[in-house]
Image (spheres, rainbow, N blue to C red):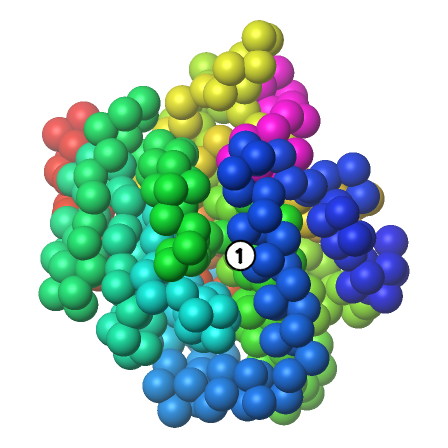
């Protein structure tokens, strides 16, 4: 499928081919229609984009650089590994791009409060940051298990003025936080905007989030031409819901560039202890979750399965609808990386390049290291380093202690 065809998606009903749509309670249909109308108007307003791009430049610190990882490249002994440094954006991840865009839209619509969910905490921090900047109220829903794993980010959100509401239902992770955020929005739509953090959920969220994250790929494309003299041969990004990946991939869809999305292989694909929707044909099937039709990890009766990943941000049972389409048409190859492999990549980048990656990003890095060893020296791999790893230090420390004790 050509870039021009994909760029016309979603269609008027919010579908990317057979995926997408708007599967929500009747109480949310009107708010979603109003949101779509407001966003379509904002898309045509030069002043909106001028304010947004000004904040990206002067507040977020964009463009984020592209870095050649020379020592990591030497250690892998093959292809060149380059990094798109979203870890250097304000708040430490790509999430701020979407948070600021939607927060500006919410203020344009007259909303006074932001609602959000978060898993790894980076989206929650970004939303709390945007709310503080723009003078909006902010409530963040977070699963109790994720709060335990991501304590520093919980503290950051609260210091920024957000109310963090623990969610103790279900697996106490991202899936359950989204459930609670949607319930809140259904009762407070008059003054609240639900600021969804990834390229999933009911239309128009997958479209909006992609559009606000496209800056990653647009910058990276120009930077690689300027610094390397040509486009990369391979792009690699981790895929939970898929916002950082679609943000990188979208600018390159028409180019002869290989694209690889990396899911969380967790501890065991065959046993179901993972969050790899495409890698597990027994459990990863088309279904509906949180308002969107896409690939979902589910049992034979259609019940949503619990997932596992060492990275809180990839621990989600569904994937964005545009990724589902890109998978089916073969434009992006989706693979998976285990907890152990991601931890190894985390340690390698820290010791060889002085960079602590988020565990989510470490999944993409592990795939890049594996691929680099198989490709020639002139091959260029660009990895989207979607976030920094400060938030994961407790998880990494515990995992390394368990590894030494095994």
Q: Nearer the viewer, residue 41 or 30?
A: 30
In the displayed structure, does residue 382 sit left or right of residue 43?
A: left
Q: Which residue is mark 1?
A: 243
Q: Residue furthest front?
A: 190
In the displayed structure, does residue 196 sit left or right of residue 31?
A: left
Q: Is residue 297 above or below residue 391?
A: above
In the displayed structure, does residue 77 sit left or right of residue 259?
A: left
* Number of residues whose C-alpha sits closer than 10 Å to that of mark 1, classed few (under 14), some (14–19) or many (20 or more): many
Residue lying at 34% horizontally and 36% vertically, measured from the top left: 180
> The C terminus appears in which quarter of the rendering?
top left
Q: Is residue 191 above or below residue 275?
A: below
Residue lying at 38% horizontally and 56% vertically, measured from the top left: 192
Residue lying at 42% horizontally and 55% vertically, measured from the top left: 190
Magenta stretch: give its range.
278-293
Residue 378 quadrant: bottom right
Spot occupied by residue 140 in the image (x, y as percentages of width and height) = 27, 51
Q: Secondary structure at mark 1?
A: helix
Spot occupied by residue 193 in the image (x, y as percentages of width and height) = 42, 57
Whether residue 190 is visible, yes or no, is yes
Q: Is residue 109 above or below residue 197?
A: below
Spot occupied by residue 92 in the image (x, y as percentages of width and height) = 31, 69
């Amino acid at each position: 499928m050509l870039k021009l065809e994909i760029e016309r998606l979603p269609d008027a009903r919010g579908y990317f081919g057979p995926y997408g749509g708007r599967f929500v309670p009747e109480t949310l249909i009107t708010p979603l229609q109003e949101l779509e109308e407001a966003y379509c108007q904002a898309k045509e307003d030069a002043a909106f984009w001028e304010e947004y791009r000004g904040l990206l430049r002067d507040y977020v610190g964009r463009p984020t650089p592209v870095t050649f990882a020379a020592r990591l490249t030497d250690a892998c002994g093959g292809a060149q590994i380059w990094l798109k440094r979203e870890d250097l954006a304000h708040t430490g991840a790509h999430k701020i791009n979407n948070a600021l865009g939607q927060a500006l839209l919410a203020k344009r619509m007259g909303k006074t409060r932001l609602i959000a969910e978060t898993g790894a905490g980076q989206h929650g921090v970004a939303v709390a940051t945007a709310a503080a900047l723009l003078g909006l109220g902010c409530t963040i829903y977070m699963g109790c298990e994720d709060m335990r794993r991501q304590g520093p980010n919980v503290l950051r959100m609260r210091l920024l003025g957000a109310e963090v509401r623990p969610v103790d239902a279900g697996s106490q992770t991202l899936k359950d936080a989204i459930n609670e955020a949607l319930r809140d929005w259904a009762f407070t739509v008059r003054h609240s905007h639900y600021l969804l953090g990834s390229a999933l959920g009911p239309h128009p969220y997958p479209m909006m989030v992609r559009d606000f994250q496209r800056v990653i790929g647009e910058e990276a494309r120009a930077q690689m031409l300027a610094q390397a003299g040509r486009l990369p041969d391979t792009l690699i990004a981790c895929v939970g819901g898929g916002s950082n990946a679609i943000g990188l991939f979208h600018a390159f869809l028409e180019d002869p560039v290989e694209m690889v999305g990396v899911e969380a292989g967790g501890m065991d694909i065959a046993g179901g202890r993972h969050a790899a929707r495409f890698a597990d044909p027994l459990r990863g099937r088309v279904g509906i979750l949180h308002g969107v039709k896409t690939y979902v990890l589910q049992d034979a009766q259609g019940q949503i399965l619990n997932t596992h990943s060492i990275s809180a941000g990839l621990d989600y049972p569904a994937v964005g609808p545009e990724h589902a389409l890109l998978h089916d048409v073969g434009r992006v190859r989706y693979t998976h990386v285990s907890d152990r492999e991601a931890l190894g990549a985390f340690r390698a980048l820290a010791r060889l390049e002085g960079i602590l990656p988020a565990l989510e990003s470490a999944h993409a890095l592990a795939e890049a290291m594996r691929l680099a060893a198989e490709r020639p020296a002139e091959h260029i791999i660009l990895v989207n380093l979607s976030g920094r790893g400060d938030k994961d230090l407790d998880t990494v420390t515990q995992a390394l202690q368990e590894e030494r004790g095994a």
